[in-house]
Image: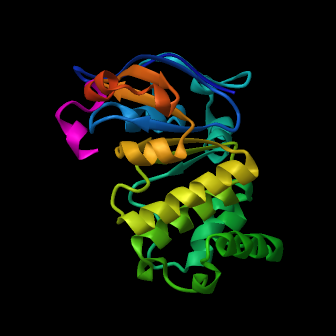
Amino acid sequence: MLKLAGLSKSFGARRALDDVSLTFQPGEFVGIIGRSGAGKSTLLRCINRLHEPTAGKVFFNDTDVTALKGAALRQWRADCAMIFQQFNLSGRLDVLTNVLVGRLQKRSTLSSLFMLFSEDERAAAVAILARFDLADAALQRAETLSGGQQQRVAIARALMQEPKLILADEPIASLDPQNSEAVMDALAGVNAREGITVLCNLHDLDVAEQYCRRIVGMERGRIVYDGPPTGLDHATRQRIYGQDLKAT
């Protein structure tokens, strides 16, 4: 179970998160919605400690994540896989190696430095790529793939970490509808098959309603809605999206 207790984050005078308290149960697929600047990305980055919270705590089961340091923090970041809007792949490396990078935190310093992977790890990476219809592209440079394919490679890399939690930060923001569907189907498949909790930042409300059983709505760093998609009435949607409502 993931629990956020009074989580706040300030950047100078700007408060990006304001006293956020949420609990996520194992196996949930949660869509976090809101306009740009609502605090969605900051929320995920505080969970995996890319940002240090100004106040509040993050707990995973009995572990105080906000107190982790050194090797324990590196392990948390392996357990808490992050998927970024811009994929964060090494374009000049082949697809297979990009996926195998997900294993580096579980290996010795020497084997990580020289990218030394076992045959079992290579077979596991190919099997994951096959799940996402990308096995034939395993030896292509990542930069030769479409945006949707690259994002699915990023999801495959996250799976190689054997995570307990996946944080997806606007994973389809730069993709066309067809590729967006493929990426969301991949995340939904991981959630259903592995039972991994997925927190997914989304701007498109229709996508959130289609894929997520729970919606968290944010506005100016605060939680203004937390519940099923069916509970989002017009007034709540208007509060979350304001003038952008017509575009969602």
Please indicate whether residue 42 sits to the left or right of residue 29 in the image: left
Q: Is residue 224 above or below residue 214?
A: above
Nearer-the-camera pick, 200 or 57: 200
For the question of whether residue 83 can be seen, the reply is yes
Residue 49 lies, in percent from the top left, at 51, 35
Q: Quadrant of the N terminus?
A: top right
Query: Which residue: 62% across, 64% down?
Result: 156
Q: Is residue 69 above or below residue 205?
A: above
Question: Main SS of the magenta segment?
Answer: helix
Residue 94 sits in quarter: bottom right
**Range drawn in magenta:** 239-248
Please indicate whether residue 127 sits to the left or right of residue 166 in the image: right
Query: Which residue: 43% across, 83% down?
Result: 144
Q: Quadrant of the C terminus?
A: top left
Q: Is residue 13 above or below residue 43?
A: above
Q: Is residue 242 magenta?
A: yes
Please indicate whether residue 43 sits to the left or right of residue 137 in the image: left
Residue 131 sits in quarter: bottom right
Residue 64 sits in quarter: top right
Query: Which residue: 42% across, 68% down?
Result: 178
Residue 209 lies, in percent from the top left, at 46, 41
